[in-house]
C-alpha cells in the first residue's frame, strides 16, 4: 500500500465542493457556536477512541456525512461505539449537531473540514468501520482524481481499518459506480486489502440492514435513480 503523502493529488489534500450554503438560522448557529466546540475532534495529535471518549471502544468513521442522518442513526444504534464524522459543508455540520442534540448522542465527535486530515491522524488498524456514502461524483473525466474512490484515500481507509473491519460505500451515480468497480478490482484481487462482501446482485441492489436512507439518497430515488450499496471487509 502506498503511504498518504502530502502534495499527492490523489490524497485530496485540497478540498473541492462547497463549504457554505444558506445562512444558518439562529438555533443552528447556536449549536455551531456552543455544541460543536464541545464535541469537535481536536485539531492536532493522534485521534483515538481513548482520547475522544475516555476509554477504548470500537471506532467508526464517516467521510462526508452530509446532513448527518446516517451518522446519528448508527451512533444511536451502537451507543457503546464511538463515531467520528467529518464534513466541510457548514450547513451539514449544523444539521448533524441538531440530530446529535435531539438524540442525546454522547458517542459522536465531529470535524468541520476535510475528512482525510483527520483520518490521517487515526492510528493504523484502529477503525472498526468506515462509511463513504454518496461521495461527490465529479463525473467529468478531467475531475476523476477528485473522487474519494481513488488510491490515495482508499489506501488510507484500508490502513486505518482493523482486520475484519468494514468499509461501506454507496452511490447513485453510474459514472462513479463504474469508476469505483474498476478501482476496487485492484483492492479486492489477490493480495489486495479487501474482500467484497457480495454473493450476487441482491447484495449491491438492496440496502443492507442498519444502513439507513439519507436525505440525499431519498432525493436520488425520487428522481428515479438506482442506488448501489457496497460492503468490503478488511483482510
Ligand atoms: C453528495 S453528498 C452526500 C452526503 C451524505 N454522505 C449522504 O449520503 O447524504 C457528498 C458530501 O461529501 C462531502 N465532502 C466532499 N469532500 C469531502 C472531504 N474531503 N471530506 C469530507 N467530506 C467531503 C460534501 O461536502 C458533501 O456533503
Image: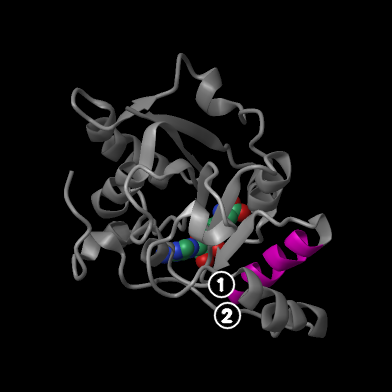
Horizontal side, residue 59 vs residue 33: left or right: left
Horizontal side, residue 184 vs residue 199: left or right: left
Residue 177, quarter of picture? top left
Residue holding disc 2: 20
For this rendering, which residue is in front, 228 or 81?
81
Whether residue 95 appears in magenta in the rendering, the answer is yes
- Cβ of mark 1 under 8 Å from ligand 1: the answer is yes
Horizontal side, residue 185 vs residue 233: left or right: left
For this rendering, which residue is in front, 51 or 211?
51
Whether residue 232 appears in magenta in the rendering, the answer is no
Expressed as whole percent of the image width and height from the top left, the position of residue 70 reads 65, 48
Res 30 seen here:
yes
Q: How is the image coloured?
A: one colour
**Which residues, given as a range, are shown in magenta?**
90-101
> Could you classify mark 2 by the number of other residues whose Cα lies within 10 Å: few (under 14), some (14-19), or many (20 or more)?
few
| In contact (CB < 8 Å): disc 1 and disc 2 | yes
Residue at position x 65%, y 73% in the image? 38
Residue at position x 59%, y 42% in the image? 225
Expressed as whole percent of the image width and height from the top left, the position of residue 221 reads 66, 43
Residue holding disc 1: 89
The secondary structure that dominates the magenta segment is helix
> Could you classify mark 1 by the number of other residues whose Cα lies within 10 Å: few (under 14), some (14-19), or many (20 or more)?
many
Q: Is mark 1 on a helix, strand or loop?
A: loop
Q: In the image, is residue 88 above or below residue 150?
A: below
Expressed as whole percent of the image width and height from the top left, the position of residue 157 reads 35, 47
Res 172 seen here:
no
Q: In the image, is residue 124 above or below residue 182?
A: below
Amino acid at each position: 500500500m502506498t503511504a498518504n503523502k502530502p502534495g499527492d493529488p490523489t490524497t485530496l489534500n485540497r478540498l473541492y465542493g462547497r463549504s457554505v450554503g444558506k445562512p444558518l438560522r439562529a438555533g443552528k448557529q447556536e449549536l455551531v457556536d456552543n455544541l460543536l466546540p464541545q464535541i469537535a475532534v481536536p485539531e492536532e495529535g493522534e485521534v483515538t477512541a481513548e482520547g475522544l471518549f475516555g476509554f477504548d471502544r470500537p471506532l467508526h468513521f464517516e467521510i462526508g456525512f452530509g446532513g448527518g442522518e446516517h451518522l446519528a442513526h448508527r451512533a444511536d444504534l451502537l451507543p457503546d461505539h464511538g463515531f467520528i464524522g467529518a464534513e466541510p459543508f457548514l450547513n451539514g455540520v449544523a444539521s448533524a449537531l441538531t440530530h446529535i442534540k435531539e438524540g442525546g448522542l454522547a458517542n459522536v465527535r465531529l470535524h468541520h473540514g476535510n475528512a482525510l486530515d483527520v483520518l490521517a491522524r487515526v492510528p493504523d488498524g484502529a477503525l472498526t468501520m468506515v462509511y463513504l456514502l454518496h461521495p461527490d461524483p465529479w463525473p467529468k473525466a478531467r475531475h476523476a482524481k477528485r473522487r474519494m474512490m481513488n488510491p490515495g484515500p482508499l489506501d488510507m481507509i484500508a490502513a486505518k481499518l482493523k482486520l475484519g473491519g468494514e468499509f461501506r460505500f454507496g452511490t447513485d451515480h453510474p459514472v462513479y459506480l463504474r469508476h469505483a468497480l474498476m478501482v476496487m478490482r485492484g483492492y479486492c484481487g489477490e493480495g489486495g486489502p479487501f474482500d467484497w462482501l457480495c454473493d450476487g446482485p441482491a447484495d449491491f441492489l438492496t440496502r443492507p440492514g442498519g444502513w439507513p436512507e439519507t436525505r440525499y439518497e431519498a432525493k436520488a430515488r425520487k428522481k428515479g435513480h438506482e442506488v448501489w450499496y457496497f460492503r468490503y471487509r478488511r483482510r
